[in-house]
């Protein structure tokens, strides 16, 4: 079972629950940057983690993104199809009672961020967190409901939440407070309706960046887009925003896909203040 690490931001305790760690050729992850890639210290094969973040305060129990889920038809894609992981057991080992979760925040609706919204039980998909409000993009939901290509994911990971009356959709055009702790920031590019979630507690800050970045090298080279970026110019803009925001707020950055601890500090380079440095914590 992966090591369980805990981090503190003010009164909030944050824990990663890992579903799986996959490996990609770096050239496949960054296909548009082959020449630059060859000049870096990035290994030929890079690790990409898929996980959830659990945010616990004295009053709240929050899950940010829900990984891929077991038993899903994902068209034979070996990274996502018919997984049989120990995610639920790891969630329990991290001290999370799924019935006590009050909020699930989804940065976007891609398959590796929504799967454990539900679980398979006696022939039905049921909400994994039946006492939570699930917060996600209204416009992304609308696009997916109109696109047959997303019907399977919609059916097993989103529709049961809608049917249970647990969904809370929103699409604010700019920074919007979700509650006293959390703020929603649109950060499109990876997907049209992608969002990042900021946490502020007792004067300390964190940013849950979703898929703004897939590898720490992008803190050094924010113009690098991964193969997963749908709108590359907007992805670069959102990445630059996230880097600046973290540096300005001395925030911990909680990545959805970095390996190792998946958590680090982003600071302005002492050599070139227009560049940023990354340090795992």
Image (cartoon, rainbow, N blue to C red):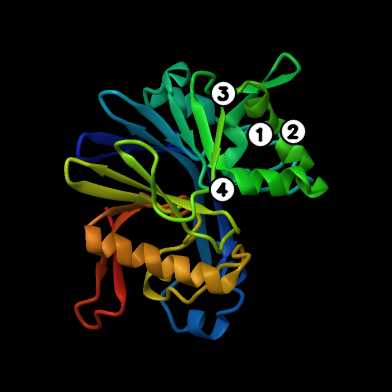
Residue under label 3? 128
Residue under label 4? 108
User: How packed is label 1: few (under 14 Cα within 10 Å), some, or many (20 or more)?
Assistant: many
The vertical placement of 201 against 156, above or below, is below
Q: In which quarter of the image is residue 138?
A: top right
The vertical placement of 12 against 207, above or below, is above
- Tag 1 near tag 2, CB within 8 Å: yes
User: Where is residue 67 shown, x and y percent of the image?
Assistant: 55, 40
Residue occupying the point 71% across, 41% down: 81
Residue under label 2? 155
Residue under label 1? 158
Tell me the distance, in whole angstroms, between the alpha carbons under discs 3 and 4.
18 Å
> Who is closer to the viewer here, 261 or 174?
174
Q: Earlier in the sequence, mark 4 or mark 2?
A: 4
Q: In this view, does 198 lie to the left or right of 200?
A: right
Tell me the distance, in whole angstroms, between the alpha carbons under discs 1 and 3.
11 Å
Tell me the distance, in whole angstroms, between the alpha carbons under discs 1 and 4.
12 Å
Q: Which of marks 3 and 4 is nearer the N terminus?
A: 4
């Amino acid at each position: 079972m992966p090591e369980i690490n805990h981090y503190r931001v003010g009164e909030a305790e944050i824990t990663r629950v890992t579903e799986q760690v996959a490996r990609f050729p770096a050239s496949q992850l960054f296909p548009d940057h082959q020449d630059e890639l060859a000049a870096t210290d990035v290994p030929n094969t890079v690790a990409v983690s898929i996980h959830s973040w659990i945010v616990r305060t004295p009053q709240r129990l929050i899950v940010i993104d829900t990984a891929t889920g077991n038993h899903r038809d994902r068209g034979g894609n070996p990274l996502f199809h018919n997984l049989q992981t120990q995610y639920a057991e790891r969630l329990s080992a991290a001290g999370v009672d799924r019935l006590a979760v009050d909020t699930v925040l989804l940065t976007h609706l891609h398959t590796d961020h929504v799967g454990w919204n539900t679980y398979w039980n006696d022939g039905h998909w049921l909400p994994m967190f039946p006492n939570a409000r699930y917060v996600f993009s209204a416009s992304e939901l609308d696009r997916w409901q109109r696109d047959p290509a997303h019907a399977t994911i919609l059916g097993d990971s989103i529709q049961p939440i809608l049917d249970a009356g647990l969904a809370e959709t929103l699409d604010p055009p700019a920074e919007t407070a979700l509650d006293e702790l959390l703020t929603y920031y649109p950060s499109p590019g990876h997907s049209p309706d992608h969002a990042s979630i900021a946490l502020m507690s007792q004067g300390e800050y964190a940013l849950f960046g979703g898929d703004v970045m897939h590898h720490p090298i992008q803190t050094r080279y924010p113009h690098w887009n991964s193969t997963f970026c749908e709108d590359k110019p907007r992805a670069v803009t959102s990445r630059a925003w996230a880097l600046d925001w973290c540096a300005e707020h001395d925030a911990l950055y909680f990545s959805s896909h970095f390996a190792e601890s998946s958590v680090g500090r982003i600071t302005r380079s002492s050599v070139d203040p227009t560049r940023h440095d990354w340090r795992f914590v």
